[in-house]
């Protein structure tokens, strides 16, 4: 039996370009396990490393990293996707609509641009699974940084109606009118999940990161045949997905959302160009 060779170990030297992923917690992040092999595949002298950033320290950490001359980009996870926007000099339409960002890059002139690929990656993952969001009834629980990005991409993908649920009334009051202006009559907000008509129910909250967490919504309230998706990546099999599977629902894990962002990262950070390869923008998610 042939034993597969281990992946190459990146050699970090004085010419290595740096990328950081910021979060709190950060032990669950999977981006380094995907991006670092991509750097190796492209023969790029670059490394992505995790940074544990407490919310109160975010500004000092981001501004400090932005002053590091060989740091080319930042990825951002919970709970910083909203707050990090203030450290960008320019933002994409996805950031403007969602109010959150998950990637920042240094421009040649030293300015920083922000974008958000969470929603695009989520929609691509659904379609790769064979679930077409267009025309569907969707309940999305969580109006935070990731949830707002997923909401934008689901609406852009043509869902018939999006029921956005979050007990944070201020978050709903900020997000729902902004999205209604772009997609009138297709989004509604509520403090508690409305599940009775859902073709797809999505958890976009942190509930499930810890085994002690309650379920973000009651799967018993879903109609037969509804799909249940969770954007949490670790643990892969959350309590919500187990409960949904036990009731016969199709489940969709969190990892495809990140895996389907790789092409967007390649384009955003110009990795193929840096590697001397021809570049091609990824197909739009919607």
Image: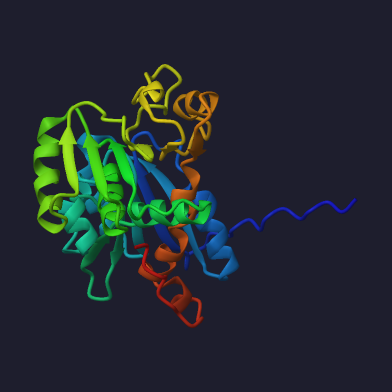
Q: Is residue 61 left or right of residue 222?
A: left
Question: Between 21 and 146, which is closer to the camera in this rendering?
Answer: 146
- Count of labels shown? 0
Q: Is residue 283 above or below residue 114?
A: below
Question: Between 85 and 125, which is closer to the camera in this rendering?
Answer: 125
Q: Quadrant of residue 216?
A: top left
Percent x, y for residue 27? 45, 35
Q: Is residue 131 above or below residue 80?
A: below
Question: Between 41 and 236, which is closer to the camera in this rendering?
Answer: 236
Q: Residue at x 46, y 56 (%)?
A: 127
Q: Residue at x 41, y 63 (%)?
A: 265
Question: Between 130 and 40, which is closer to the camera in this rendering?
Answer: 130
Percent x, y for residue 38? 54, 62
What residue occupies the far right of the structure in this picture?
A: 1
Q: Residue at x 47, y 39 (%)?
A: 233
Quadrant of image for the C terminus: bottom left
């Amino acid at each position: 039996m042939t034993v597969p060779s281990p992946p190459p170990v990146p050699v970090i030297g004085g010419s290595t370009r740096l990328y950081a992923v910021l979060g709190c917690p950060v032990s669950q992040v999977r981006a380094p396990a995907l991006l670092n092999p991509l750097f190796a595949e492209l023969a790029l002298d670059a490394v992505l490393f995790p940074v544990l950033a407490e919310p109160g320290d975010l500004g000092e950490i981001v501004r400090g990293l932005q002053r590091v001359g060989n740091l080319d980009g930042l990825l951002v996870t919970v709970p910083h996707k909203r707050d990090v926007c203030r450290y960008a000099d320019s933002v994409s339409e996805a950031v403007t609509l969602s109010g959150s960002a998950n990637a920042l890059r240094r421009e040649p002139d030293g300015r920083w641009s922000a974008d958000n690929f969470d929603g695009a990656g989520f929609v691509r993952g659904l379609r790769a699974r064979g679930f077409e969001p267009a025309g569907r009834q969707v309940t999305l629980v969580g109006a935070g940084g990731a949830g707002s990005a997923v909401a934008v991409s689901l609406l852009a993908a043509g869902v018939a109606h999006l029921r956005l649920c979050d007990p944070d009334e201020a978050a709903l009051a900020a997000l729902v009118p902004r999205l209604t202006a772009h997609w009138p009559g297709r989004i509604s907000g509520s403090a508690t999940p409305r599940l009775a008509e859902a073709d797809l129910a999505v958890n976009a909250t942190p509930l499930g990161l810890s085994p002690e967490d309650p379920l973000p919504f009651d799967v018993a309230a879903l109609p037969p045949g509804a799909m249940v998706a969770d954007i949490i990546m670790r643990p892969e099999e959350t309590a919500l997905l187990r409960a949904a599977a036990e009731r016969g629902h199709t489940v969709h894990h969190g990892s495809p959302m990140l895996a389907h962002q790789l092409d967007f990262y390649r384009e955003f950070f110009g990795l193929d160009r840096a590697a001397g390869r021809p570049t091609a923008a990824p197909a739009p998610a919607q």
